[in-house]
Amino acid sequence: MECPIPSEDGLNFICDYPEGDIRLSVDDWIDRDYDYFEFLTPDMRNSSLQLQGPCYPIIFPSVNVHWSCQFIARASNISLRHWQQMGGVTIEENILIDKTIHRAINSPSAVLKRYVADIGKAWPVLIVCGGILPLFLSVIWLLMIRHFVAGMTWITVILFNALIISVTMFYYAKAGWIGHDAISVVIDESDPYVNISGREINHIRAVAVLMTVVMIITFLSSIAIVRRILIATSVLKVASKVIGEVQALIVFPILPYSILAIFYMFWFSATLYLFSSGQIIRNDCNANCCSYDLKSNRVNCDSCCGYSIHYTPHIGISILFHLFGCYWATQFIIACSSTVIAGSVASYYWARGEISEIPFLPVFSSMKRLLRYSIGSVALGSLVVSIVEWFRFILESLRRRLKLADTAPVSCMGKMMSSSSQCCLGCIDWTIKSVNRNAYIMIAITGKGFCKASAIATGLIMNNILRIGKVNVIGDVILFLGKLCVSLFCALFAFLMLDTHKYKSAHNRISSPLFPVQVCWGLGYIVATLFFAVVEMSIDTIILSFCQDAEEHQGTAQCAPPLLMETLDGEGETQRLTQGS
């Protein structure tokens, strides 16, 4: 039941199951700590002294490594001396079993397998902390921004700092820098002679250092924006007013959230079929490759080079199309959601807020307009983003392949050109995404096609760049902190769930909480992004509607509610900021 250790004053044995000439019950065998050497016949004793069983000397200490007892290097001098006096065969002390096990434990493939196994064992944590909890917290945040907007900005900043400090402290605890709860792939007591630890501890220490840097930067940044929080409060008041009037917007993100969840289930199923549909071909054995064949009970040098999966061109093209289709479908669903939200908010703005008695009608009307008039424009916009992103992915893959193939050192000019190209592609990708986002808003407002709506949105932004910059920057920062609050709370709750006895013992024991926590963090951020898009799109739609309204009425918005006029023109900037029109 526990890994054997040498005796401090003699020599103990571990014996096989009592059978044959051994007249000993299994219960007695267990009570005697599996040692019945004194009951052996002369032939059995001589066989045991030759290390051929049924009893084996306990000379080297061992530790429990993934439910198997593995030797560590240093032998017990007392037990070894007794073994030699009994006439046992010579045992080399410089065994390398522990080092071999150590290398096997720390190999990248073994670490990756343990991480994947951690995800499989912690699937209830992923469902709770990556799906249910962020959905609940996002709805709560939207309700609070609706009823308690004045204090939500301050609460968000304070809560964000508290959560990031808490998550960082958990990383410190699992890294062994705080308390005595460090992770280890070695189960039971640590090796007293050799420190057998996996790469997981190094990974989590690296993340702890990174989190420390992020914590310091975010804490200083939150102090720096304190003076600007009042501006964000004014902006969020406008968005909360709209959400309060069009109350269906609070629960609307559940629809795209559910559609994406169902789509990903089918997509992952199809992915498994595609990647498993290749031909299995045995590798060529060009080098000396021998292994012990358990069936033939001999060394075999003919078929030990392994197998690989070969994909035909049709399957390869299908896999590429499948990956591209996933990104396009994701962008399309998000674009449809953004357009519906923009249409609902635009209905509120251009109706001068006279829809408070029928709060669900604007959302249904916006969905109807999308499906009837604008579905092609949204599909085109999401396709443009997908093509640019895919082109960027292909170029990055080619750059990495060329870098691996070229053994010559890269010059400074080459590094500069490579960095510049990546930066340019990133800027193009960000610009297209921003243009598309504003184009969806103008599609919902004007009903124009994608290209025409993009041109109108770009013109409005260029003519009102100061107003949009003033209103959006701090508001986006607060919303970003809100998303991080939701995702950090999910990560913190995942740490707490994984710290229970269920995931620290038996076969559900995880090697490291790093991957499950990171996955919960990412899923929480994605879910929060879907819900917080309501506020973001509300702000952007109101601003562009205000700019469009002002441009159509010679610089004076006619449909803007008083609260919006107070926020955007509180300093008398209407004429100055719209003079470019």
Image: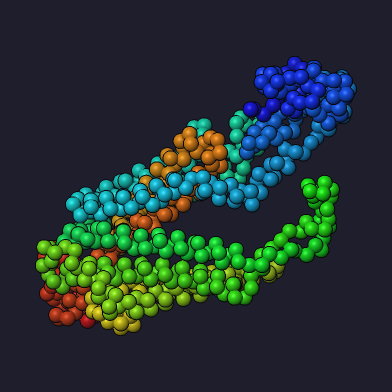
Instruction: Give above or below for 431 relative to 55.
Output: below
Question: What residue is drawn where x is 14% and y is 64%?
Answer: 358
Q: Is residue 552 above or below residue 507?
A: below
The residue sitting at 37% across, 76% down in the picture is 379
Q: Is residue 564 visible?
A: yes
| Total tally of numbered discs in the picture | 0
Given residues 317 and 342, the one toward you in this image is: 317
How is the protein colored in the picture?
Answer: rainbow
Residue 245 lies in what quarter of the image? bottom left
- Quick check: 158 left or right of 403? left
Q: Is residue 228 above or below residue 445?
A: above
Task: Name the quadrant containing residue 581.
Answer: bottom left
* Residue for point 37% across, 63% down: 259
Above or below, 424 against 306 in this view is: below
Q: Nearer the viewer, residue 51 or 104?
A: 51
Place of residue 439 in the rendered image (x, y in percent of width and height, measured from the top left): 31, 76
Percent position of residue 276, x then y: 60, 63
- Residue 78 in view here: no
* Figure quadrant of the N terminus: top right
How far across and how far down the image is residue 78, in percent? 78, 20
Q: Residue at x 68, y 34 (%)?
A: 69
Left or right position of 64 against 35: left
Q: Is 174 left or right of 149, judged from the image as shown? A: right
Q: Position of residue 178 (x, y in %)?
A: 49, 35
Question: Quadrant of the rendered structure where residue 530 is?
Answer: bottom left
